Image: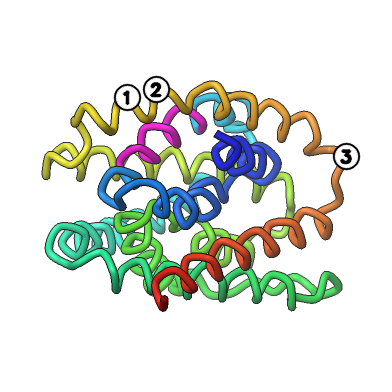
């Protein structure tokens, strides 16, 4: 429950990051094919709770541009989830989480904002869709793209919260089609985690205005680096 509280505290502050923090730790306690659909249910609840408060600030035109490429990536990710063994997927997740955490920690806060071409949505959308379907962890990929398209931290947070809802809904549809989500184990586990979920979001939302952007980035980076490193250590051993 502490994992869920911490993950959704970060979600409350930044509008994303719940799955990339929670999944690498949860898969050490539960099977991957239980954790991923459980996070779909929880992210829907979290996105509805936060999204209704910030949706007016979201840049929806950027998300509409990402959708077609995301659908392609999610289709590929679902196929991999069904047909591939868990071990190499978990190894990939560990590398991804640790690498993303290291990147955030090394990033200079003084960097000026540079707007990239909108066609970068193609590789970012496909890669984000694959990781979203596989591990429910596409958020860091999307925030990397949107962060280079949107200059305002307030608009970026709102856009990411709206994006998580959109992506989670698409994951839900995919998983209902392939019958990965409506199992007793998934539903019971999700229900038991709802209290720390809402407590985490409430706490994160409360502290959102108190924390500087630099402090929050460093915190997320350290958590990602720790989660990914622990998962890599387990897989390699």
Percent across and percent down for residue 217 are 74, 59
- The kind of secondary structure element at disc 1 is helix
Q: Are marks 2 and 1 in contact (CB under 8 Å)?
A: yes
Q: Which residue is mark 3?
A: 210
Q: Secondary structure at mark 3?
A: loop
Residue ID at (83%, 60%): 214
| Pick the front one: 221 or 226 | 226
Quarter holding residue 191: top left
Residue named by callout 1: 188
Is-magenta flag for residue 142? no
Compared with 220, 160 (above or below) is above
Earlier-in-chain disc, 3 versus 1: 1
Q: Name the front one of labels 2 and 3.
A: 2
**CA gap, disc 2 and disc 3:** 31 Å
Q: Give the CA separation, mark 2 to mark 1.
A: 5 Å
**Could you tell me if the residues under marks 3 and 1 are in contact, i.e. CB atoms within 8 Å?**
no
Alpha carbon separation for disc pair 3 and 1: 35 Å
Residue 43 part of the magenta segment: yes
Q: Quadrant of the C terminus?
A: bottom left
Residue 56 position, x and y percent, is: 61, 32
Query: Can you identify the residue that label 2 sits on?
Result: 191
Residue 190 coordinates in the image, percent (x, y)? 38, 29
| Picture disc at residue 160 | none
Q: Is residue 72 left or right of residue 222?
A: left
The residue lying at 67 percent from left, 46 percent from top is 14
Magenta segment main secondary structure: helix
What colour-coding does the image apply? rainbow
């Amino acid at each position: 429950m502490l994992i869920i509280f911490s993950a959704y505290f970060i979600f409350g502050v930044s509008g994303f990051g719940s799955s990339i923090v929670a999944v690498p730790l949860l898969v050490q306690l539960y099977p991957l094919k239980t954790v991923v659909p459980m996070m779909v249910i929880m992210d829907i609840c979290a996105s509805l709770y936060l999204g209704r408060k910030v949706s007016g600030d979201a840049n929806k035109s950027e998300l509409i541009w990402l959708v077609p490429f995301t659908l392609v990536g999610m289709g590929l990710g679902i196929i991999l989830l069904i047909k591939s063994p868990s071990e190499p997927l978990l190894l990939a997740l560990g590398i991804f989480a640790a690498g993303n955490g290291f990147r955030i920690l090394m990033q200079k806060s003084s960097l000026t904002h540079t707007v990239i071409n909108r066609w970068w949505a193609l590789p970012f959308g496909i890669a984000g869709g694959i990781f979203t379907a596989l591990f429910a962890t596409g958020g860091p990929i999307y925030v990397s793209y949107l962060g280079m398209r949107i200059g305002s931290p307030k608009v970026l947070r709102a856009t990411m919260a709206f994006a998580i809802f959109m992506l989670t809904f698409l994951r839900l549809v995919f998983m209902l089609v392939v019958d990965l989500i409506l199992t007793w184990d998934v539903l019971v586990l999700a229900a038991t985690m709802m209290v720390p979920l809402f407590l985490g979001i409430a706490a994160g939302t409360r502290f959102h205005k108190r924390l500087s952007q630099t402090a929050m980035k460093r915190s997320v980076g350290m958590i990602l680096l720790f989660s990914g490193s622990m998962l890599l250590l387990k897989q390699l051993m």
